[in-house]
Amino acid sequence: MVKKIIIFFILFVAVYSFGQSEISEHTTKNKASQILVSADSSYLPKDSLKNIYVRLSIKTVPDSAEIILDSIVKGMSPLIVDSVFLGKHSLIVRKNGYFGKKMIIALENDTFFEINISLVKPGSLIVTSTPSDAIIYMNNKEMGKTPYINSFMKPQEYIIKCVKDSFEAYEQKINVIEGKRDSIHIDLKLIQPQNKIVKKEDIKKKIKLNRVTAIITACLFASFLIFIFAVEINDNLK
């Protein structure tokens, strides 16, 4: 009888200990899950959210530009992005027919941050020449041969140079305007051979020299005739 009581007591203690360990483990898991859940922004106090997130507003000119924040497409402008972490973020704004913009933005400790971005529309340029097939340089960079067409040029001032063998090089400044198309035509001048180039001053000098030579020749001839005439007179007198 005593043995049965002791065995029953031991079994009771074992079962009770096992039950307590299960309850303790379950409680620990609940606490861990509560800790994980509390890390979610929805469980944080409102005051602490102000120190972590920023509401970002992005406006563009023109509208309907694609907004990419940290390599994730967020939508089209104008756009408001909620719950953006403080710190540096990469921002890309692009739209068909415009030059895109890529930048790094630094969000400060504030609840609202607004960015205004103006996109630039490219200009167009057509360059032709006579004769054609001349090499075109823009700001000392070879771009191609005439006829040359570029419909996606950054609006700014360019120095255009046109070069072709046996012709004089041509250089001109041109200002490409945003959204405008411009064209220029270049008439290249043929380089004259050096032996055929005669200056007016050289011609005048040559004419003057010829006149002097003619006068001297005439004087010598006249002197010779006078000498002959004098000899004949002298012979006759003898």
Image (cartoon, rainbow, N blue to C red):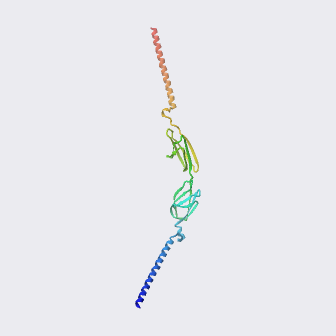
Question: At 48% from the left edge and 18% from the top edge, which residue is drawn?
Answer: 221
Q: Is residue 208 visible?
A: yes
Depth check: give the residue in front, 220 or 102: 102
Q: Is residue 137 visible?
A: no
* Residue 108: percent from left, percent from top: 52, 63
* Residue 7: percent from left, percent from top: 41, 87
Classify the position of the N terminus by image quarter. bottom left
Indicate whether 211 appears above or below 90.
Answer: above
* Residue 9: percent from left, percent from top: 43, 87
Image quadrant assignment for residue 13:
bottom left
Question: At 44% from the left edge and 83% from the top edge, which residue is drawn?
Answer: 15
* Residue 124: percent from left, percent from top: 56, 48
Question: At 41% from the left edge and 89% from the top edge, which residue is drawn?
Answer: 4
Please give left or right for residue 227 compared with residue 115 in the image.
Answer: left
Indicate whether 140 appears above or below 118.
Answer: above
Please give left or right for residue 1 compared with residue 34 in the image.
Answer: left
Classify the position of the C terminus by image quarter. top left
Indicate whether 228 appears above or below 167.
Answer: above
